[in-house]
Amino acid sequence: ARAEKGGHRHFMAKEIHEQPQTLKDVLELYIEGDRIVPPAEVDFAALSRLTIVACGTAHIAGTVAKYWFERIARLPVECDIASEYRYRDPVIDPAGAVMLISQSGETADTLAAMRHAAGEAASILSVVNVPTSSIARESDVAFPIAAGVEVGVASTKAFMNQLAVLLCLAILAGRQRGTLDAEREAELVSELRRLPGLVSQALAIESRCADLASWLAEASDILFLGRGPMFPLAHEGALKLKEISYIHAEAYASGELKHGPIALVDRSLPVVVFAPSDALFDKTVSNVQEVMAREGQVLLVTDAEGAAAGGQGCRDILTMPDCDPMVTPLLYAVPAQLLAYHTAVHKGTDVDQPRNLAKSVTVE
Ligand code: G6P
């Protein structure tokens, strides 16, 4: 059985380690030279807005995409959970597109949301891993993510490739809407080409994550913090941890800490902070100091510059490779996955088949 897991203990570990390759595979589909050339046609220029609808990890990918589409393409984005969207009688803008994100392409709530919007929105786009799935077949334009078969219930390589496709589409949208010049497009594309290598480098923190697992596995609650596009990554870290280690975890926007969750902070609370040294770094560091002043135990996930500038007093630091702030969400998915994985392994839970969860939820 270990052979089908590529020599790894679990499918999840195999899939985490496949990411440099699966990322390369998907980028080949979307990049030509120094430009984005997607495998399916889409025109973002005339859209009034983009509504992204998904469940679980795919929804988290959508919340990252909101930052990209708004920042790079100045396209207003709303991102909703499929089970909420479909029942709240949403206002569907006929000049806007609805985009479904789904690994399986069969999630009942996402499929129903798509059918609800069909015929009302300008177009129905999908970002799906299984090309023969219902969502891929029924949407107007389906964007493949080419992650290959994902077996682990907790999504890893599909999340990574969803992010890659969404970033490529946001760059394309920027070009089409005239908010991104050719030079910046080429710069982002070259950063995307570097990503598989950066993800390989990031995987080198694995043994550190395994060491940290004995501390995290003792906790009854863990807080994840992040700002900007790192806020969704905090959600992904918390979701993965809950799913496979059964430890209660919560994600908060760093700046929102003072409006509630800071009341939880004491010595027993690990606080994982995703904070690359970007424009928001200093703000996040001041939130980290608020946590440390209350004896909260901080694990700072940052780059070398961030470690030097904001690492003082943290319980531990995971140092990630440097990259353009626009691509950090892909890179910081790696520590989110590895911390959850090793904490679960330490606890001895069934990593690939966590209790009560299914890979694809085809009922309501
Ligand atoms: C299930 C899985 C999650 C997944 C979600 C959405 O709950 O356990 O890992 O993110 O469904 O699945 P989809 O196939 O639509 O991406």
Image (tube, rainbow, N blue to C red):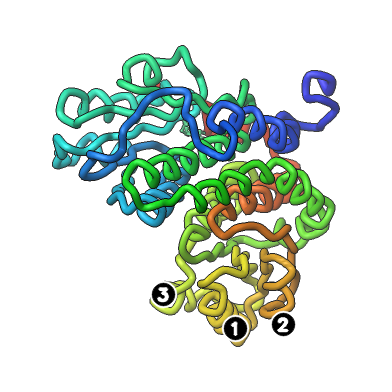
Which residue is under mark 1? Answer: 289
Mark with earlier residue (2, 3): 3
At 53% from the left edge and 65% from the top edge, which residue is drawn?
225
Q: Is mark 3 within 8 Å of ligand 1?
A: no
> Closer to the observer: label 1 or label 3?
1
Q: Is residue 334 left or right of residue 189?
A: right
Can residue 115 be seen by looking at this rendering?
yes
Q: Give percent across and percent down for residue 64.
A: 45, 50
Density class for disc 2 (Cα within 10 Å; few <14, some 14-19, many ≥20) is few
Which residue is under mark 3? Answer: 260
Residue sitting nearer the eye, 145 or 190: 190
Which residue is under mark 2? Answer: 313
Q: Are marks 1 and 2 in contact (CB under 8 Å)?
A: yes
Q: Which of the 4 quarters of the picture holds residue 7?
A: top right
Amino acid under disc 2: Gly
Amino acid under disc 3: Gly
Q: Is residue 141 above or below residue 8?
A: above
- Residue lying furthest bottom: 293
Look at the numbered disc 3 and give the secondary structure of its residue. Answer: loop
At 64% from the left edge and 34% from the top edge, which residue is drawn?
23
Q: CA gap, disc 2 to disc 3? A: 23 Å
> Closer to the observer: label 2 or label 3?
2
Q: Is residue 104 left or right of residue 325?
A: left
